[in-house]
Image (cartoon, rainbow, N blue to C red):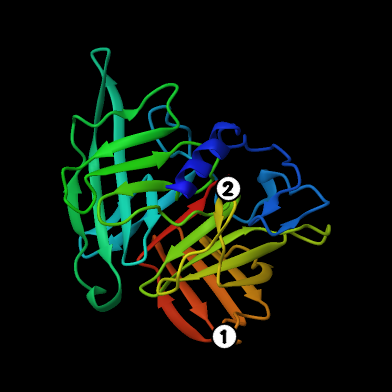
Amino acid sequence: MRIAGTLLVVAACKSVGPPADETLGPPRIDAVESCSAPAPATSVLPVPVRPPADPYRISPWALMGFRDREGFHPATLLCDLPSRVLVVAAEQTVSGGKRVTGGTAWSIPRGAATGRAAVPVPILASSPGCLEGQMTCTWATGSVDEPTIDQLKGPQWVATSGWVHGVEDMCRALPDDTIAVCSTANRLAYVELGCQDGQGVKLQLGLHDESLERHYDLDVENPVARLYGTADAPSGDTFTYRFTGAGDAKGHYKSASLTIDVAGKTGRLDLDGAREDCLAFGIYRR
């Protein structure tokens, strides 16, 4: 609860996502280091281009979702929890002057249950949804494990922040300038802007092992390892980010790459030479 309160206060002080050509100020990197140089303009970020705006879409800035035997399921929230990944596809429209809510939430198991089919639950029409003046959008499912999901409003480029009321608590808290996310069976990996030096767009990778105790620094969860790198030149609709670093406290995780295939709607993490497919992924669109 202490962390959830902090998140809400931070969100209330910021505006929504940046327009396409805005140059951002120096970012705060995971509450650990400060950058002296401003971040690059969003128009040069190594991410796909955003499609035409839909005023009724709840999360318009990112492509998010997961793929199963039935195909790709787009999402509006990717909530990474220790034992599972909760993928939410919320809908809110207006009909006859009234707000209409709906959609689906899927629970994708981790650990020994990895490989089982994602369990869908409907978002109830009675959900409050997104209300003006509120800092969260609230989705009710009626499920025992996630009866209510509060999705945090705010400036996140890839929507990952929220609170699940039920058997677990807060979705893993990631920096606002995260441009790509991958939840595998074993961990969460995310790519965010790094400190810039004028030589291309500098990025960094954060890793969260699911089995470890969660630690926070202000409103952001500390990763177990942080690596540094850049993006490859885009290859069609495929975006690859490569990183190296000192690794974690045990000397693991010294090299990594994250690849998102926007057309194929798949993602994979390669960590110290071992491949892990993304159970779910998200990528910002400029």
Residue 263 visible in the snapshot: no
Indicate the position of residue 282 as horizontal and vertical percent values.
45, 55
- The structure residue drawn at horizontal position 46% and vertical position 36%, both measured from the top left corner, is 153
The number of discs equals 2
The amino acid pointed to by label 2 is Asp
Crowd class of label 1 (few under 14; some 14 to 19; many from 20; radius 10 Å) = some
| Residue 89: numbered disc | none
| Residue 47 in the figure: left or right of residue 113 | right
- Mark 1 lies on residue: 252
Residue reaching furthest front?
2
Q: CA distance from mark 2 to mark 1?
A: 26 Å
Residue at image point 18% right, 31% down: 125
Q: Residues within 10 Å of mark 2 (few under 14, many from 20)?
A: many
At mark 2, the secondary structure is loop
**Foreground: 187 or 33?**
33
Q: Nearer the viewer, residue 49 or 147?
A: 147
